[in-house]
Image (tube, rainbow, N blue to C red):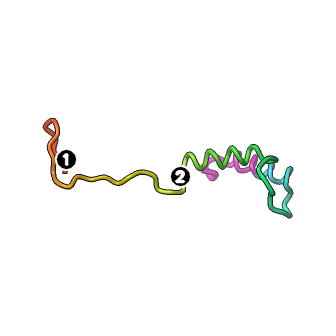
Amino acid sequence: MLARQPEVQESAFAEIKANIGLDRLPNDMDDLPYIHAFITELLRFRVPTWVGVPHSNLKDEEYKGCHIP
């Protein structure tokens, strides 16, 4: 995502640099609203875990004239 939108990466880096600096890790996200929104959107866009229940038929079915294997 960041490769396609370098301005987002630049804005995120600028916020980190302005609020945290480059010599330490952040203690919390209160000072980083843009980063927080970015991470929230990233997790919405690409869920880190597999979501959903696999399903399949135990046997072939026919529904309204359509064959379902």
Whether 3 is among the magenta residues is yes
Whether 33 is among the magenta residues is no
Q: Is residue 3 left or right of residue 60?
A: right
Please name whichever residue, 35 or 17, is drawn nearer the observer in this view of the structure: 35
Q: Which residues are magenta?
A: 1-12
The image shows residue 9 at horizontal and vertical percentages of 71, 50
According to the picture, the residue beneath numbered tag 1 turns out to be: 68
The image shows residue 55 at horizontal and vertical percentages of 31, 52
According to the picture, the residue beneath numbered tag 2 turns out to be: 47
Label 2 crowd (10 A; few <14 / some 14-19 / many >=20): few
What amino acid is labelled 2 in the image?
Val
What amino acid is labelled 1 in the image?
Ile
Q: Is residue 37 left or right of residue 65?
A: right
Q: CA distance from mark 1 to mark 2?
A: 29 Å
The image shows residue 21 at horizontal and vertical percentages of 86, 57
Label 1 crowd (10 A; few <14 / some 14-19 / many >=20): few
Please name whichever residue, 20 or 27, is drawn nearer the observer in this view of the structure: 27
Instruction: State the residue at coordinates (15%, 51%).
Output: 60
Outermost residue toward the top in this view: 64
